[in-house]
Image: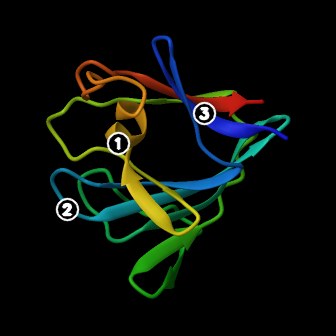
Amino acid sequence: MPVACLITGAHVARLAVAFTLAWTHSVEKTEWQEDWRATPRGLVLDAVRVEGSGAGMEPPEDATREGRFYVAHPLLPPQSEVLLRRSGATADWRVCMDGTCRPMGTLLGALSADLSPAAADPVRLTVCD
């Protein structure tokens, strides 16, 4: 069964079949979350949740308000990979699996002592076996 993996250089961190990527916009301080799923055809984006709008963080047009988030279900084809940039100038991506969220650096740091944002940029999100 395929799972998602984070890859930077020669380092690979295995995730899970289903996971959430979350981050906080550096200017608006609003939360954005994406639910992803690893499939044999690639990474599938199941849902997007956006806390607010402004500075390029507009909710998708078909989003509906659910609690504090606008929620949408994009119709994108499976992605072979997603490129995640880590400048170190903003808070790190958070990866959530099984109800627990951790900074991406924590997952990558388990692989090497120096996988800070600058040392691990970019990070590829892809499917692996």
In the figure, is residue 58 to the left or right of 35?
left
Which residue appears at 42% of the width and 60% of the height? 101
Which residue appears at 26% of the width and 21% of the height? 114
For residue 30, above or below residue 93: below
User: From the viewer's perspective, is the residue at label 3 or at label 2 nearer?
Assistant: 3
Which residue appears at 28% of the width and 24% of the height? 113
| Residue 84 quadrant | top left
Query: Which one is in front, 28 or 2?
Result: 2
Question: Cβ–Cβ below 8 Å for labels 3 and 1?
Answer: no
Query: Which one is in front, 59 or 82?
Result: 82
Q: Which mark is residue 106?
A: 1
Q: Picture coordinates of residue 28 (x, y %)? A: 19, 60
Which residue appears at 33% of the width and 38% of the height? 105
Q: Which quarter of the rendering shows the C terminus?
A: top right
Question: How crowded is the residue under tag 3: few (<14 C-alpha within 10 Å), some, or many (20+)?
Answer: many
Q: Secondary structure at mark 1?
A: helix
In the figure, is residue 51 to the left or right of 66?
left
Q: Give the amino acid at mark 3.
A: Cys
Q: Secondary structure at mark 3?
A: strand
Upstream in sequence: badge 1 or badge 2: 2
Question: Cβ–Cβ below 8 Å for labels 1 and 2?
Answer: no
Upstream in sequence: badge 3 or badge 1: 3
Q: Give the amino acid at mark 1.
A: Thr
In the figure, is residue 73 to the left or right of 105?
right
Measured in 3D between alpha carbons, the distance from the residue under mark 1 to the one under mark 2, in whole angstroms, is 22 Å
Q: Which mark is residue 5?
A: 3
| Residue 102 quadrant | bottom left
Q: Picture coordinates of residue 31 (x, y %)? A: 33, 64
